Amino acid sequence: MRLLICIVFTLCFIEMNAQNDSILKFKDRLSYYSAYSGNNIFNPGLKFGLDYNIYSKIKQKNKGNKIKTRNHHLKMDGNLGFYWDPKSQIGVYTNYGLVYTKTHTKGFQYQIGLNPIGYYRSFLPETYEVTDDWEVKKVTLPGRNYYAPTFLIGIGKTRKGKQLNSWFLNINSMLLVPYNSRFMPLFYLEYGYRFNFQKR
């Protein structure tokens, strides 16, 4: 009986450690970011997101007496952002997709991303409409919904030993569909930082 109890406790302990290791590995692959995201540069906005590393590959090359390393990462990306155009609207959006990052030996990074799943909602200022009875009525939450895929390209640099472990500068293009009878492109300049609570 004692042997059986010892075996049960041992198995439970191993299972708990395995779960803890899985959670730690998941958190280590997860990183967060925040950025200033200016629509058409001049309209101020903010963007918050997270990405999860699904694939990594390290390549090394010998050049003379130096070893050059290239880290390749493919990440799942999700974000939520907004911007304010004082003359027309407030825009709120969310996007989901993939981002590929290449990091050089000294930490300099290139990245490119495609988020095919996207949603954009515009909120217009005070708006009125004429009803069928020819009465003027104030519209509640005026605005429109759009399908909004995005594409980004950018640069950055890792910061070893820092809680904010890398900075990035991206040019982001969003497509609003349908806009009138076609589509409307929006352009964002993004500057921000990534961080991971597991890394010290």
Image (cartoon, rainbow, N blue to C red):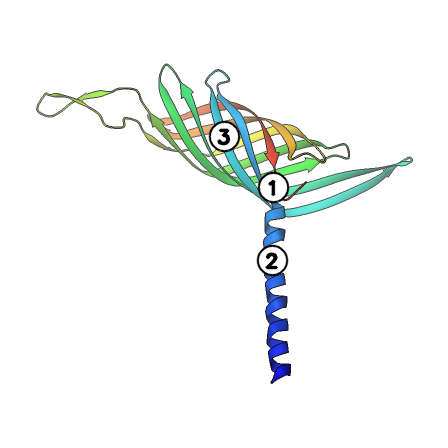
Disc nearer the start of the sequence (3/1): 3
> Is label 3 or label 1 in front?
1
| 107 vs 127: above or below | below
Tag 1 residue:
197
Q: Position of residue 91 (x, y in %)?
A: 39, 26
Question: Observer-nearest residue: 24 or 134?
Answer: 24
Q: Position of residue 25 (x, y in %)?
A: 63, 52
- Distance in Å between CA atoms under marks 3 and 1: 19 Å
| 43 vs 111: above or below | above
- Residue 179 visible? The answer is no
- Distance in Å between CA atoms under marks 2 and 1: 16 Å
Q: Secondary structure at mark 1?
A: loop
Report the amino acid beneath label 3: Lys
Question: Observer-nearest residue: 145 or 161?
Answer: 161
Q: Is residue 12 left or right of residue 92?
A: right
The residue under the point 73% across, 33% down is 107
- Distance in Å between CA atoms under marks 2 and 3: 31 Å
The dot on residue 47 is 3
State which quadrant residue 120 falls in. top left
Report the amino acid beneath label 1: Phe
Residue furthest out toward the front: 2
The dot on residue 20 is 2
Disc nearer the start of the sequence (2/3): 2
